[in-house]
Image (spheres, grey):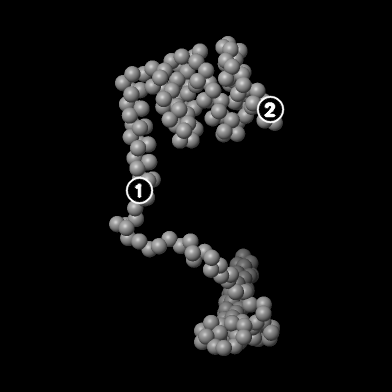
């Protein structure tokens, strides 16, 4: 029993020694790798900084250097033929807006009057329709927007006008004209054919024939 225990102790000691040796070798190897990597990194970064300027081909480096010197010192050296120079369009200077203060900026008198009148007319027509909602007031708004080429409003008020008198050709014709002007020729023809299917109208029929001929 004593000899067996002794052998086991020897085995344990040998295992511990091996483990210590392995740890020591691992520590030494780690220190060596760290030292080598730091030494390599230091020398490599220094070499790269020194070598980088020489990696540029001589003609390109000369061209770049001449461009930089000419920009900084404004020397009389001739620029290379391949140097990219921004295009200068002197005509655009003529269209620059004058620098005016906010007090000096004013609309032309005619445009101001036209805008004011248009707003006042629109407000009056809306007031009239809100007061009396009938065919005439609704069509007046539709035609007002048609003259001012506000086609989305024309469509709204043409439909509203038709609600008051669906047999009248006026809102249908106005609606078809707007759809045609907006490029929707098929819808313009469809709306006129739909109306003519119930009511006979010379003006609507002539307009339909005209739109069908525009192919």
Task: Give how far apart the Cα atoms at labels 1 and 2 are.
Answer: 44 Å
Quick one: quadrant of the C terminus?
A: top right
Element type at marker 2? loop
**Between 13 and 31, which is closer to the camera in this rendering?**
31
Q: Secondary structure at mark 1?
A: helix
Q: Quadrant of residue 213?
A: top right
Q: Quadrant of residue 198?
A: top right
Q: Is residue 128 visible?
A: yes
Q: Residue at x 36, y 32 (%)?
A: 122
- Reply above or below: 124 against 43: above
Q: Nearer the viewer, mark 1 or mark 2?
A: 1
In the rendered image, which residue does mark 2 sit on? 213
The residue located at (33%, 31%) in the rendering is: 123
Res. 29 mark: none
Whether the residues at callouts 1 and 2 have beta carbons within 8 Å, the answer is no
Residue depicted at x 58% and y 19%: 204
| Picture residue at 65% right of the left edge, 23% below the top | 209
**Rendering coords of residue 147 (x, y %):** 46, 33
């Amino acid at each position: 029993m004593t000899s067996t225990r002794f052998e086991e102790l020897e085995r344990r000691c040998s295992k511990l020694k091996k483990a210590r040796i392995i740890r020591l070798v691992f520590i030494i190897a780690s220190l060596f790798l760290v030292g080598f990597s730091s030494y390599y990194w230091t020398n490599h970064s220094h070499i790269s900084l020194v070598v980088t300027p020489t990696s540029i081909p001589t003609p390109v480096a000369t061209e770049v250097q001449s461009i930089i010197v000419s920009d900084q010192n404004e020397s009389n050296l001739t620029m290379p033929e391949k140097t990219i120079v921004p295009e200068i369009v002197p005509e655009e200077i003529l269209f620059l807006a004058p620098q005016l203060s906010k007090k000096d900026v004013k609309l032309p008198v005619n445009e101001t009057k036209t805008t004011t009148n248009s707003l006042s007319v629109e407000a009056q027509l809306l007031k009239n329709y809100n007061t009396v909602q009938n065919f005439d007031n609704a069509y007046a708004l539709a035609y007002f927007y048609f003259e001012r080429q506000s086609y989305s409003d024309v469509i709204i008020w043409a439909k509203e006008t038709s609600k008051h008198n669906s047999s009248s050709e006026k809102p249908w014709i106005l609606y078809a004209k707007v759809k045609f002007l907006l490029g929707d020729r098929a819808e313009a023809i469809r709306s006129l054919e739909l109306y003519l299917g119930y009511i006979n109208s010379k003006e609507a029929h002539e307009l339909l024939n005209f739109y069908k001929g525009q192919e």
